[in-house]
Image: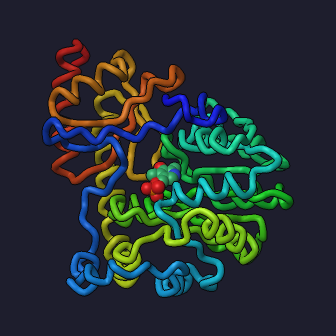
Amino acid sequence: MSRFLSPKYAKLEAYTPGEQPRDKQYIKLNTNESPYPPSPQVLDALTRKDVEDLRLYSDPEGAALREKLAKLYGVEPGNVFLSNGSDDILNFAFMAFANDGAVFPGLTYSFYPVFADLHGVAYDTVPLKEDFSVDVDGMKGTGKFTVLANPNAPTGLALPLENVEEIIASNPDQVVVIDEAYVDFGAESAASLVDKYENLLVVMTYSKSRSMAGARLGFGLASRPIIQDLEKIKYSTNPYNVNRLTLKLGEAAVDSDEYFRENARKIMDTREKTAAALKELGFTMPDSKTNFLFVKREGLDGGVLYQKLKDRGVLIRHFSDPRIAQYNRVTIGTPEEMAAFLEGVKEIMKEEGLA
Ligand SMILES: *Cc1c(COP(=O)(O)O)cnc(C)c1O
């Protein structure tokens, strides 16, 4: 820390992204990226002219992409907000709407408490139930800015839309954010409720199901007044928050929407097969509606499994939080990658005297 840093940031603990190691080629099952490339339309979307045009600013309104996304989700372009990854919207939302404090589940995306701390927002957490599901009653009527990842991370569990709606409806004087980073892997989206609830902000990303984590593109769907508030924050920080190339790629992805939905189906199929194979080996896990599994094996230390797989060139995500230190989060890759992962797990179990 330099002696110049504002005291208000001195104690801030930043978010820790998953490892992106460069020492060797890993089978990367640690950051929930897609194992599949974006659609052929996306691959062919950029021309030399587009790169030349980088001399020009991007459209700060992102009008063309907003129109396409609005059509896709059955809302008006004025109900769509574009951002530099969905973390960008979450940041703006904590900045804009959390004046009375924030509430989120006790175990969830670990960026939420960082945003709260960054903006000096006091927050409460609602502990998960014994089975790791979100405590719906605990999330209702909080009277505070409320954030729910649905499906939740790192558990992978999703709430039915009915429960999500109860949470939104119970808190009419506060914004309720539904973070749907993983919704395309088998959960129900709250996008259909945007016209019904003035206080709802649905946040989505191109990073997971749409195979475009590196493009940094997220979007929010909400009532017009909420979008206008987000725009006010954006135009006060970084009006060109989405670059020209990413806007164009984002449009091509909507034009080839069926392609990523097919990839998501493949990933769900691989997920179910991987879950079944792990269960045969004695692993337990919540029922995932995401592109990852949150797994544990009695008698096999979570940290040991993580390290030994890493030694074999397979990277998964281990969390140091003592409540979940026996678990690992495993991103679903291609069938071949999952076969290599399972092979590694079997070898390690032998070494540990478990098979
Ligand atoms: C990955 C993820 C995000 C954000 O991803 P971006 O790459 O910033 O769009 C947001 N919320 C959850 C729960 C995530 O897992």
Residue 173: name its quadrant: bottom right
Residue 6 locus on image (x, y percent): 62, 36
Which sits in the foreground, 62 or 338?
62
Q: Residue at x 20, y 43 (%)?
A: 27
Q: Residue at x 34, y 79 (%)?
A: 55
Colour setup of the view: rainbow
Residue 131 locus on image (x, y percent): 58, 34
Image quarter hosting the C terminus: top left
Residue 5: name its quadrant: top right
Q: Residue farthest to the front?
A: 4
Q: Is residue 242 above or below residue 335?
A: below
- Does residue 9 appear anywhere in the picture? yes
Which sits in the foreground, 122 or 326?
122
Residue 345 locus on image (x, y percent): 22, 29
Q: Is residue 265 above or below residue 144?
A: below
- Does residue 128 appear anywhere in the picture? no
- Count of picture labels: 0
Which sits in the foreground, 12 or 247?
12
Q: Residue at x 85, y 49 (%)?
A: 143
| Relative side of 316 to 124, left or right | left
Q: Residue at x 34, y 75 (%)?
A: 245
Q: Is residue 305 above or below residue 193?
A: above
Residue 51 locus on image (x, y percent): 26, 79
